């Protein structure tokens, strides 16, 4: 098995009316039009499967490769494919959303729920994100009925490099002028509370899902950005931010040649050009291009002087033992 260079699929136009043009202008993405909200870097969503660019599977979708050797690629037999990696560019504020947990989503929508996380790539001055709700003694349903939902939102002003953990039940909205790296469960289970009065080409507003949104919202969630915990590694260091039951999110601080040793598949997105290698070969990745490192790929490494964003499936016991008391700085680990 070898390292896959991935070509993304895109959500654009009316699918992402809030999208901008930075994925093309700043990240060099081959986007289909100027208004593109999402670059799905590693995706097995039906109709939005990312494509492998190199090697034996060149020109085939991720779904094709998974059908051939699911365990060898992912390192697990659990299906469906568990993770979805995106880059998002918000020119305008996204709808205010909340995602269900697995149990509710399976019972009501026949799909997995959705927990996700954002690593901020860019934030224009004054830009903000809605991150949970302000504390109140008033029932959320009453606030919604009285038309005061916008007043209930808790806003924060993000800076590049910050990480925000968004477990299921957390009300949130990405604000205009913000770009993020997003790792999430591979699900499109999303309930909209509010879409700022926007309408589509047909003159109609997008659908809201108030009952379901109220059902799954955890109004008592009051979260903060993630501190993270850094450990030294051959070839640099790794900062761990999240390791819950769904995914692990980390930043690779590379200064030389760093081994990439994971029990499961890993996604690596460098911020600068770099070499990704394995026993028998190597590829050059451009900035903000993503590689999928299969679980069975031997001798994988990253080489250069750069920062890379990395996601994988969680290895909680191993990381808890490595971090000791610092595990409290990693979301979802304790």
Image: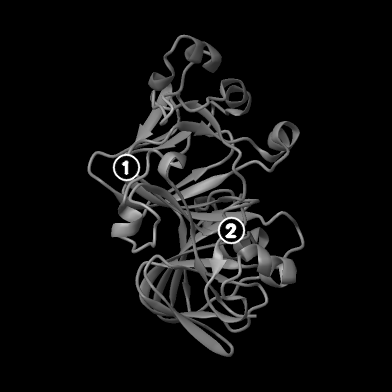
- Give percent across and percent down for residue 21: 31, 51
At 31% from the left edge and 48% from the top edge, which residue is drawn? Answer: 159
Who is closer to the viewer here, 17 or 158?
17
- Give percent across and percent down for residue 167: 56, 41
At 56% from the left edge and 54% from the top edge, which residue is drawn? Answer: 48
184 is higher (above) or lower (below) than 232: above
Viewer-side label of 1, 2: 2
Who is closer to the viewer here, 98 or 52?
52
Residue that mark 1 sits on: 91
216 is higher (above) or lower (below) than 119: above
Find the distance from the CA under tag 1 to the CA under tag 2: 25 Å
**Label 2: how many residues lie within 10 Å, few (<14), some (14-19) or many (20+)?**
many
Q: Is mark 1 in CB contact (under 8 Å) with mark 2?
A: no
The label shown at residue 18 is none
Residue that mark 2 sits on: 49
- Give percent across and percent down for residue 234: 48, 80
Judged from the image, the secondary structure of the residue bearing numbered disc 1 is loop
Is any part of residue 74 visible from this angle? Answer: no
With 216 as the anchor, is 108 left or right in this view? Answer: right
| Residue at far front of view | 202
**Count of numbered tags:** 2
At 40% from the left edge and 29% from the top edge, which residue is drawn? Answer: 154
Who is closer to the viewer here, 74 or 11?
11
At 29% from the left edge and 59% from the top edge, which residue is drawn? Answer: 26
282 is higher (above) or lower (below) than 237: below
Judged from the image, the secondary structure of the residue bearing numbered disc 2 is loop
| Residue at far left of view | 125
**Image quadrant in which the N terminus is located:** bottom right
């Amino acid at each position: 098995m070898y390292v896959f260079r991935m070509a993304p699929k895109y959500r654009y136009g009316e699918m992402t009316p809030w999208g901008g043009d930075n994925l093309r202008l700043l990240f060099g993405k081959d986007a289909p039009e100027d208004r593109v909200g999402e670059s799905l870097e590693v995706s097995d969503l039906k109709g939005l499967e990312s494509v492998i660019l190199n090697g034996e599977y060149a020109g085939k979708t991720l779904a094709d490769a998974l059908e051939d050797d699911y365990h060898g690629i992912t390192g697990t037999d659990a299906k469906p494919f568990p993770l979805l990696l995106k880059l998002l560019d918000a020119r305008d504020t996204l709808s205010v959303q909340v995602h269900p947990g697995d149990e509710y989503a399976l019972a009501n929508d026949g799909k997995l729920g959705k927990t996700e996380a954002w690593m901020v790539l860019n934030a224009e001055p004054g830009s903000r994100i809605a991150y949970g709700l302000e504390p109140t003694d008033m029932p959320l349903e009453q606030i919604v009925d009285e038309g005061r939902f916008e007043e209930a939102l808790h806003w924060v002003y993000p800076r590049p490099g910050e990480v925000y953990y968004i477990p299921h039940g957390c009300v949130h909205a990405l604000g205009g002028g913000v770009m993020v790296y997003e790792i999430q469960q591979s699900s499109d289970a999303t309930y909209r509370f509010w879409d700022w009065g926007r309408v589509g080409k047909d003159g109609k507003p997008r659908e809201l899902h108030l009952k379901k949104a109220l059902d799954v919202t955890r109004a008592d969630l009051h979260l903060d950005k993630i501190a993270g915990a850094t450990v030294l590694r051959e070839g640099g260091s790794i900062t761990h931010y999240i390791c819950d039951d769904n995914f692990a999110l980390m930043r690779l601080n590379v200064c030389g040649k760093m081994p990439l040793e994971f029990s499961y598949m890993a996604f690596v997105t460098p911020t600068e050009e770099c070499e990704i290698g394995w026993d028998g070969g190597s590829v050059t990745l451009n900035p903000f291009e993503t590689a999928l490192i299969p679980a069975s790929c031997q001798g994988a490494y990253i080489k250069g002087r750069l920062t890379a964003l990395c996601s994988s499936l969680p290895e909680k016991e191993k990381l808890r033992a490595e971090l000791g008391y610092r595990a409290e700085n990693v979301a979802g680990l304790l």
